[in-house]
Image (spheres, rainbow, N blue to C red):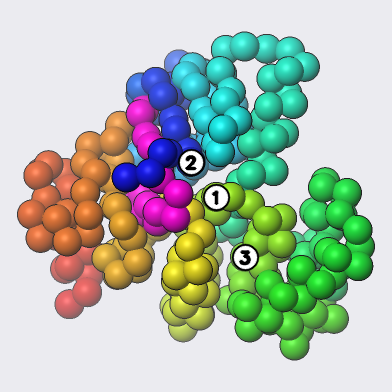
């Protein structure tokens, strides 16, 4: 296994007195696809949001592509390191978070131009390449209100890719979609994975986890309770909580 591109060490997160992440250790190698599964409230989304400091961790160390942030250190240097981590991570949310007053193309180039100071011409070329990759170039001059949920999410993926991240973070990217639109987004995510992007995906889509993930990690009550290949996890889960989760999924399939 190659050196980890994401390394989380001794991570804790409190919301007030509620201990939502408990001494998390996690390593993700370059080009790996890791799916985080678990019941609602188990801490999956909080963990993902701590990786790029959308949530401020309470304790621990987070390292992304060589940028290391010791959570309890404060000051200007820490703020710069967090900024550097965010430049290396693309985030796709449950809700699409597109600017309604901007066209698809304007939405996609906004980050590269304003955050990375990318030349506008280069940003447009990169945006059009990524929009084409997710099948949305033909909508580049439309406004978000004229798009379906699946189309909005594909634009959101193109927007994240145009920031040229080293790691893509997906926070339940299909949970806000109508069932008939889920497949188109999952297919784009499979394509991104097949092109070698490192991905950490919080998902309830067990079929996607089985088909695309290199590793599936199960969370329960703020802890990582199982970490295995999809084949191992779905055929021979070791923890009874994992077995109960998989059994619920299988009963829902029938």
**Vertical placement of residue 44 versus 69, above or below:** below
Tag 3 residue: 157
Distance, label 1 to label 2, CA atoms, is 8 Å
Q: For mark 2, give the secondary structure.
A: strand
Question: x, y percentage for residue 18?
Answer: 43, 22
Identify the residue position indicated by label 1 in the image.
167
Q: Earlier in the sequence, mark 3 or mark 2?
A: 2
For the record, the magenta segment spans 24-40
- Would you identify the image quadrant in which residue 105 lies? bottom right
Mark 1 vs mark 2, foreground winner is 2
Spatial separation of the CA atoms under disc 3 and disc 2:
20 Å
Asked whether the viewer can see residue 95, the reply is yes
- Where, quadrant-wise, is the C terminus in this rendering? bottom left
Q: Is residue 196 magenta?
A: no
**In the drawing, what numbered circle is on residue 5?**
2
Q: Position of residue 52 (x, y in %)?
A: 59, 38
As rendered, which of 196 and 24 lies closer to the eye?
Answer: 196
Q: Residues within 10 Å of mark 3 (few under 14, many from 20)?
A: many
- As helix, strand or loop, the secondary structure at mark 1 comes to strand
Residue at position x 77%, y 76% from top? 128
Sooner in the amino-acid sequence: mark 1 or mark 3: 3
Marks 3 and 2 close (CB-CB < 8 Å) = no
């Amino acid at each position: 296994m190659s050196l980890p591109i994401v390394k989380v060490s001794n991570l804790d997160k409190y919301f007030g007195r509620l201990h939502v992440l408990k001494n998390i250790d996690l390593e993700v190698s370059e080009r790996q696809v890791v799916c985080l599964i678990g019941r609602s409230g188990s801490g999956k989304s909080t963990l993902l949001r701590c990786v790029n400091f959308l949530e401020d961790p309470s304790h621990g160390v987070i390292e992304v592509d060589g940028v290391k942030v010791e959570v309890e250190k404060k000051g200007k240097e820490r703020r710069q390191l967090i900024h550097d981590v965010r430049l290396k991570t693309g985030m796709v949310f449950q809700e699409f978070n597109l600017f309604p007053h901007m066209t698809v193309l304007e939405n996609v180039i906004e980050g590269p131009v304003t955050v990375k100071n990318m030349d506008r011409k280069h940003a447009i070329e990169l945006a059009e390449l990524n929009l084409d990759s997710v099948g949305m170039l033909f909508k580049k001059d439309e406004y978000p209100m004229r798009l379906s949920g699946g189309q909005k999410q594909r634009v959101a993926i193109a927007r994240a890719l145009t920031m040229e991240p080293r790691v893509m973070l997906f926070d339940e990217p299909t949970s806000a979609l109508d069932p008939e639109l889920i497949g188109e987004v999952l297919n784009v995510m499979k394509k991104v994975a097949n092109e070698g992007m490192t991905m950490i995906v919080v998902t309830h889509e067990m079929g996607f986890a089985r088909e695309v993930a290199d590793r599936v990690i199960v969370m329960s009550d703020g802890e990582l309770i199982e970490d295995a290949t999809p084949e191992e996890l779905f055929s021979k889960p070791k923890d009874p909580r994992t077995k109960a989760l998989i059994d619920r999924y299988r009963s829902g399939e029938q």
